[in-house]
Image (cartoon, grey):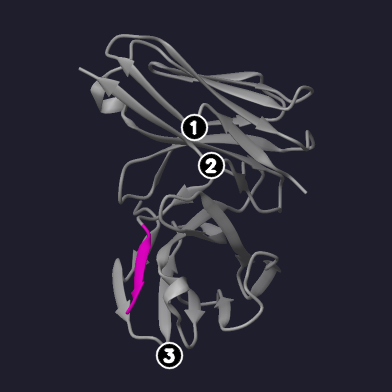
Amino acid sequence: NAGVMQNPRHLVRRRGQEARLRCSPMKGHSHVYWYRQLPEEGLKFMVYLQKENIIDESGMPKERFSAEFPKEGPSILRIQQVVRGDSAAYFCASSPLGDTGELFFGEGSRLTVL
Amino acid sequence: KQEVTQIPAALSVPEGENLVLNCSFTDSAIYNLQWFRQDPGKGLTSLLLIQSSQREQTSGRLNASLDKSSGRSTLYIAASQPGDSATYLCAAGGYGQNFVFGPGTRLSVLP
């Protein structure tokens, strides 16, 4: 059973470009969480999704950021018109449908904005 | 709003020592409490999950306890080794809600 897969592992963008980060949850998991980690800082919650639904997006910046988890395919975190402050590690975690709620993390996608 | 803190922020110990890492949370209405380790430049590895109905969990040299009424969890590491050097994070979760992370404790175990 493969773990949570994130790609790309490293992404470089120039200011104003778009960044798309993908997350494939563990097999059988229908809950996906996105977190951001700035250098030397803790993990900050961004968004919680289930298949085709956004459950909690209270941590998402109001502009330029969006997330989806379609019926088929990976979850995608999209950042439009990136700025240098978006440089960070973006982590995806998945959890099984059920009541254990245990989180399993991917290796992260590291975004660098030039 | 749930807030999670961890003490100490950093810890340096000689190899072989037993140590305790602390995690506090403000809202006791949690469903579970999960401990992770993170190595530099890597993702998070799950260490232990304690559900709200449990008091503790053990895995090898690690033991985690949970006291919901006081809003605290501790991670006990026995006979520490240099390979234990990492940042340890705790996260408080409610079913169907997002998990709130503490800032972490950076552990260095010196050979």
Residue A108 placed where, x, y %? 38, 59
Which residue has dot 1 on it?
B9
Circle 3: residue type: Gly
Determine if the magenta segment contains residue B73.
no
The local crowd at label 3, few if under 14, some if 14 to 19, many if 20 or more residues have their Cα within 10 Å, is some
In whole angstroms, how far apart are the C-alphas of marks 3 and 1?
Answer: 36 Å
The local crowd at label 2, few if under 14, some if 14 to 19, many if 20 or more residues have their Cα within 10 Å, is many
Range of magenta residues:
A108-114
> Which part of the image, by quadrant, shows the C terminus of chain A?
bottom left
The residue located at (56%, 79%) in the rendering is A65
The residue located at (34%, 16%) in the rendering is B13
Judging from the image, mark 2 belongs to the subunit labelled B
Which residue has dot 3 on it?
A16
Which residue has dot 2 on it?
B103
- Position above or below: B103 against B69: below
In whole angstroms, how far apart are the C-alphas of marks 2 and 3?
Answer: 31 Å
Counting residues from the N terminus, which is met first, the one under dot 1 or under dot 2? 1
